[in-house]
Image (cartoon, grey):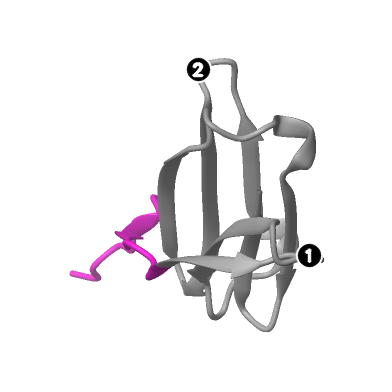
């Protein structure tokens, strides 16, 4: 009897490495809080992010790794103490950077 393969995806939930830093901005008086999330293997189009009214930044992503296998993550970060318009994000080199 032949074993049938399931068409249902198998999810690998991961907790990405997250690094918080304080950096000096354009002037010595300006400090920036920076969050760097390690997302090797992910592409920008596989990531979603949203700042909601509850003051939380929601970041998630799904990346296919093998046949029927998907690596995924979900992360919430409290950004309520920052001016939302001042938060910038960029994704490069497998890392997502948020500055506020």
Work out whether residue 7 or residue 26 is closer to the camera in this orientation and state it. 26
Give the structural element (helix, strand or loop) at label 1: loop
Which of pointers 1 and 2 indicates the residue nearer the eye? 1
Residue furthest out toward the left? 1
The 10 Å Cα crowd at callout 2, few under 14, some 14 to 19, many 20 or more, is few
Q: Which residue is mark 2?
A: 54
What are the residue bounds of the magenta stretch? 1-18
Residue 36 at x, y = what percent?
Answer: 53, 67
Q: Is residue 32 left or right of residue 4?
A: right
Please tell me whether residue 69 is drawn above or below residue 51 in the rendered image: below
Question: What is the chief secondary structure element of the magenta stretch?
Answer: loop
Q: CA distance from mark 1 to mark 2?
A: 31 Å
- Of residues 42 and 18, the one nearer the viewer is 18
Q: Which mark is residue 74?
A: none
Q: Is residue 81 above or below residue 52?
A: below
Q: Please name the residue shown 72% across and 44% down the image.
A: 87
Ranked by sequence position, the earlier of labels 1 and 2 is 1
Quickly name the residue at label 1. 27
Count the marks. 2
Height in image: 53 above or below 73?
above
Q: Nearer the viewer, residue 53 or 61?
A: 53
Specify whether residue 38 is painted magenta.
no
Q: Position of residue 19 (x, y in %)?
A: 42, 69
Residue at 54% x, 54% y: name it: 61
Q: Position of residue 22 (x, y in %)?
A: 52, 64
Q: Position of residue 83 (x, y in %)?
A: 69, 31
């Amino acid at each position: 009897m032949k074993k049938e393969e399931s068409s249902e995806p198998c999810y690998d939930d991961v907790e990405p490495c997250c690094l918080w830093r304080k950096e000096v901005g354009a002037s010595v008086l300006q400090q920036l809080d920076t969050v760097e999330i390690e997302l090797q293997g992910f592409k920008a189009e596989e990531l979603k992010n949203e700042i909601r009214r509850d003051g939380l930044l929601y970041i998630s992503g799904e990346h296919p790794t093998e046949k029927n296998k998907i690596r995924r993550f979900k992360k919430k970060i409290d950004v309520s103490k920052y001016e939302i318009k001042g938060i910038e994000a960029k994704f490069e080199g497998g890392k997502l950077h948020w500055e506020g």
